[in-house]
Amino acid sequence: MGMGEPFDNYDNLAGFLKLINDKDGYSLSMRDITVSTCGIVPMIERFGDEFKQVNLAISLHAPNDEIRCKTMPIAKAYKYDELISACRKYTEKTGRRITFEYALINGVNDTLDCADQLSKHMKGWLTHINLIPLNEVKDNSYSASSQKNIEAFKARLEAANVTVTVRRTLGTDINAACGQLRNSSR
């Protein structure tokens, strides 16, 4: 997770998954592996056909196209409804729950209206929302949501019967948390 888009290198990803699962390899159960993608829609279907036991995580970070296009360039290629539809088909085909990663950005995607929009897309099928307090990055205008907003967002999703957790953050003190690792120039 977090080190490039695995579905852009699908053939090598598939080879790796087979190798790490092989009894002569690491013999790791497919159910113990999670592949995280930004949401390359055509590859979600292929992945569901070829790796029914591997867990899938989608970096979503928004409840609609407008916000997702601002925060994730991939949203210009694959629309929100198209992505959600592909994910629903994946869960129907595999019987596996999808984890949706959702970094909470102050004033961008952390409002109760955003929580309501998100819950409409997520309730009633095999989903889990992983709320991630944003790890702030120097030279970026985004800031982390307050703890109060994070808890209110979580409570709103829970009230709509959406399964949700808040990820614990580590490494922010040394700029090594999720989203912070990058080459810095002096």
Image: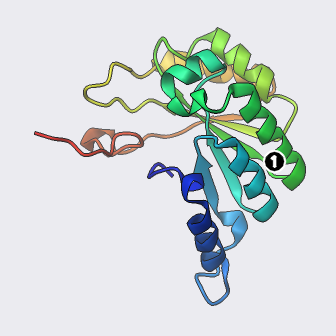
Q: Which image quadrant: the C terminus?
A: top left
Residue 48 % position (x, y): 78, 55
The amino acid marked with disc number 1 is Tyr
Which residue has dot 1 on it?
90
The answer to which quarter of the image holds residue 23 is bottom right
Indicate whether 184 appears above or below 164.
below
Asked if residue 135 can be seen in this view, the reply is yes
Residue 123 in percent (x, y) is at: 82, 28
Residue 121 percent location from the top left of the image:
78, 25
Residue nearer the viewer, 136 or 20: 20
Q: Residue at x 47, y 21 (%)?
A: 105
Horizontal side of 79 relative to 124 (left or right) equals: left
Q: Determine whether 166 is above or below 139 in the image.
A: below
Q: Colour scheme in the image?
A: rainbow
- Badge 1 marks a residue whose secondary structure is helix
Residue 133 at what x, y percent from top left?
A: 48, 30
On screen, residue 1 versus residue 122, left or right, reads: left
Residue at point 56% right, 68% down? 12
The answer to whether residue 52 is seen in the rendering is no
Q: Nearer the viewer, residue 95 or 16?
A: 16
Measured along the vertical axis of the image, is residue 124 above or below residue 184? above
Near mark 1 (Cα within 10 A), the count class, few <14, some 14-19 or many ≥20, is many
Q: Residue at x 56, y 34 (%)?
A: 74
Is 7 situated above or below 139?
Answer: below
